[in-house]
Image: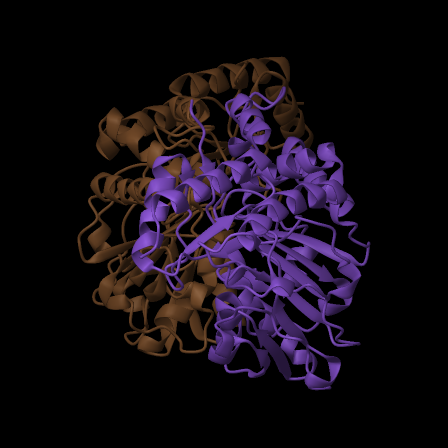
Chain colours: A purple, B brown
C-alpha cells in the first residue's frame, strides 16, 4: 500500500486511522455479527451509532440544545431548494450574497422555484477574489433569511467574519469548512454542509437548524425536504445514509481524540500558513485571492501560463500529489488541505512547487 | 468473527465476498493510492467505477439503450415526490394502485403536492394480504402514468404479473425485489428502487427511466429531483453517493459471477420454496399472504398469539437469526431473504421454527 497525498476538493482525504478502523470492522462490527452496512437502521446497534454521531458533533461544535442536527441525503445542492422551501414563508422573500459558484447556484435555485429573492452583494466583477462585506443595512428588513456560502471551494475564499444580520436568520453553506475550526453556531439560523469534504464519504448532508425555524415549511413541498419531518423522526423518516453517518462518527471521534476543534484549527492554520507563506515569498506563482478572504481549506494559485499550469498538475500527480488541478471553471491549481491532509502533505507540495519553478523558468 | 443470519427488511445482508473485497481495498483501491471514499467523483478511477456499475447493471437487467440509468440519493421516499413532478405534466393526472404501506405513501405524497391523483385499486380492506388485479380499463385513459409498488416489503406480497397499461407508462417501485430475478424492463416507463435491500448499503437510489419520459418535468421543481438533469449529467450534477455506487458495482459483479439473474432467481426460488413449503405443511404458524401474491423476498408469518410472536423474535435473535420481528405496523414475523441470504440461513430458520413450535405448544 502506497498512499498518496490527495488534494481533491471533494470527495477528499479521510484520516488514515479512520479508514483503517472502518476496514477492520467492515465485515463484522463489534459483537453484532454483521457489517454496519447491513444493520437495520432501527436496530439498537445502529441507533447507538447515530446517537453517538450526533452527540459527538454537538460536543465538537458546541451546538446548543435549541438546534436540531439532521443527517440527510442529497448534498448541499438539495439544500439549495430546501432552504427557501422551509424558510421563505416566514416573510415571502429572502436575500442572498453571491461569493462564488455554489452561492450563485443556491440563489438561482431559489429563483427557479419562483421565489422573491434578491442578491444583495456579490464579488463577481472581481472574479470572486474576495468575499463581500455585508452589513445589516444591506439586507431587506423583511427578508426571511440571508444566505451565504461561508467557504468558497472553487475560488479559495472564506468569510473572515460572521455577517451581523440582527434578527434575520443567517443561513450558511459550510460544506468546505465544517468542523475545520470552532464556529459560533448561535450566530446562525441554519448551517448545512455536504459531508464529502471534511466529514465523511459523499452521500451525507448535515443540517443544523434552530428549532424556531422548523414551522414555516411550504405545504406542497416534497416531504423528504422538510426539515421538521426529519427533525421529528430523528433523521429516520426513511432509511438514512447509515454507513456515511457511521464514517462521520469515526471522523468526529478522531477529531475529539486530537483535542477538538481548537486543536484542529491549530493544525489547519499551521498547514495553511506554510503554503501561503511560501506563496507570499516568491514570484513564480500567483495567489489570486485577497489576503483577508483567504480560505484555510482551499488554496488557489496559478503560474500565469495555462500550459505550465497543466504541466504542473500532471507532474505533481506523477509525484504522488494528486488532484491539484483547479476547478474546470477557473483553471490554475487548487490545493484542498482539509482536516485529513497531513502537514507532511503540504511540505511535500511546497517542495514540489519549488522544484517545478526551478525546472520550468518562465519565458 | 461470527456472522449471523440477518433477516432484516433493509438495510439487509450483503454478500460476504462483496464485504470481504470492500474491506480488503477500503484503505487503498488498486493502484490509486487512496480509498474509493476519497476519490474525486470526476477522477478517471472513479469514472471507471460508475461506468462499470452502469454497464454491469445494464447487462444484468438487460436494460435497453433507450432507458437511462440514474444513481441518485434520497431513497424511494424522495422518488414518491419526483415521480409526479417529472411525469404528471404529460396529462395533468395520474393513477395509483395501493397494495401496502409504501405504495400508500407514494399516493399520499402526490396528493400532498396538490396533484390530481386517483387510487384505482387497493387491497386495504383485506389487510393487503394480496395484490390487486389491475386491468387496463381501470386506468383513466388520460392518466400520465400508473404507479405500483411491485414487491410489498411489509406485507410480503408481490405482483405475480406485470399490469398491462397499454400506452400509459407503468411506474414501479422495486426497492425490495430489484435484481432478485429477471424482469422485462420494456414493460415499464420507470423503475426505481432504494438500494438498501438487495443492491448496496443505504444512501443510493436507482432510477431507470425511458428517455421519452424525461421532457415533462415541472419548471419550478427542485433541480436535484429532475431526472433529465441527472441523466444529462451522468448522475453527476452534484457529487453522487460514490461509495454506495461502488458497493453496488461489487454486488452486480457478484451476481454476474453467479450466472446473472436467471441463476439468482433459481437460488431465490429455492430459498423461498423451502420456507413456504414448511409453512404450508404445518399448522403452528399462519402465513397470511394469499399464495398467488407471495413475495420471494419477504416472507411473513404469525403464530396467532402476539406474546408468542414476541418470544419467537427474541429467541431467534439469541440463536443468531436476527431481525425476524415483523414491521411495527403489522406485528408478527417477517423473514427477508434477499439475494445475499444464504440457503443455509433459511434452513436454520426452519429448524428454529420447528424447535420453537415443539417447545411452545399453544393453549
Please identify the quadrant where the N terminus of chain B is shown. Answer: top right
Question: Residue B55 placed where, x, y %?
Answer: 23, 43
Question: Residue B60 placed where, x, y %?
Answer: 24, 39
Location of residue A110 with respect to B68 vertically, above or below: below
- Residue B79 seen in this snapshot: yes
Please identify the quadrant where the C terminus of chain B is shown. Answer: top right
Picture residue at 65% right of the left edge, 31% below the top: A45
Farthest residue, direction right: A65
Residue A17 quadrant? top right
Picture residue at 35% right of the left edge, 65% below the top: B229
Question: Residue B91 placed where, x, y %?
Answer: 32, 78
Q: Is residue A135 left or right of residue B194?
A: right
Farthest residue, direction left: B65
Q: Is residue B189 left or right of residue A276?
A: left
Residue B167 quadrant? bottom left
- Residue A74 seen in this snapshot: no
Q: Nearer the viewer, residue A122 or B61?
A: A122
Location of residue A219 with respect to A50 vertically, above or below: below
Picture residue at 51% right of the left edge, 32% below the top: A38
Question: Residue A101 placed where, x, y %?
Answer: 48, 67
Amino acid at each position: 500500500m502506497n498512499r498518496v497525498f490527495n488534494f481533491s476538493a471533494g470527495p477528499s482525504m479521510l484520516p488514515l486511522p479512520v479508514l483503517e478502523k472502518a476496514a477492520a470492522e467492515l465485515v463484522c462490527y463489534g459483537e453484532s455479527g454483521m457489517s454496519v452496512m447491513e444493520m437495520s437502521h432501527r436496530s439498537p446497534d445502529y441507533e447507538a451509532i447515530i446517537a453517538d454521531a450526533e452527540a459527538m458533533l454537538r460536543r465538537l461544535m458546541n451546538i446548543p440544545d435549541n438546534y436540531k442536527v439532521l443527517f440527510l441525503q442529497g448534498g448541499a445542492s438539495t439544500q439549495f431548494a430546501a432552504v427557501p422551501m422551509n424558510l421563505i414563508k416566514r416573510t415571502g422573500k429572502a436575500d442572498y450574497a453571491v461569493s462564488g459558484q455554489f452561492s450563485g447556484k443556491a440563489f438561482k435555485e431559489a429563483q427557479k422555484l419562483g421565489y422573491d429573492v434578491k442578491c444583495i452583494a456579490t464579488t463577481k466583477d472581481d472574479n470572486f477574489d474576495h468575499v463581500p462585506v455585508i452589513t445589516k443595512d444591506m439586507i431587506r428588513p423583511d427578508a426571511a433569511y440571508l444566505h451565504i456560502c461561508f467557504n468558497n471551494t472553487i475560488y479559495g475564499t472564506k468569510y473572515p467574519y460572521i455577517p451581523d444580520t440582527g434578527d434575520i436568520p443567517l443561513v450558511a453553506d459550510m460544506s468546505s469548512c465544517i468542523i475545520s475550526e470552532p464556529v459560533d453556531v448561535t450566530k446562525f439560523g441554519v448551517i448545512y454542509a455536504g459531508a464529502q469534504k471534511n466529514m465523511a464519504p459523499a452521500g451525507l448532508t448535515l443540517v443544523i437548524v434552530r428549532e424556531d425555524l422548523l414551522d414555516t415549511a411550504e405545504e406542497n413541498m416534497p416531504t423528504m425536504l422538510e426539515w421538521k419531518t426529519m427533525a421529528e423522526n430523528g433523521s429516520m423518516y426513511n432509511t438514512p445514509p447509515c454507513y456515511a453517518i457511521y464514517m462521520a462518527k469515526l471522523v468526529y471521534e478522531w477529531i475529539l481524540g486530537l483535542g477538538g476543534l481548537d486543536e484542529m484549527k491549530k493544525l489547519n492554520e499551521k498547514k495553511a500558513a506554510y503554503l501561503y507563506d511560501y506563496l507570499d515569498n516568491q514570484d513564480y506563482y500567483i495567489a489570486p485571492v485577497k489576503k483577508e478572504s483567504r480560505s484555510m481549506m482551499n488554496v488557489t494559485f496559478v503560474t500565469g501560463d495555462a500550459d505550465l499550469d497543466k504541466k504542473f498538475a500532471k507532474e505533481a500527480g506523477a509525484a504522488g500529489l494528486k488532484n491539484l488541478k483547479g476547478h474546470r471553471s477557473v483553471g490554475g491549481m487548487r490545493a484542498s488541505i482539509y482536516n485529513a491532509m497531513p502537514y507532511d502533505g503540504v511540505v511535500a507540495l511546497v517542495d514540489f512547487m519549488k522544484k517545478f519553478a526551478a525546472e520550468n523558468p518562465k519565458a
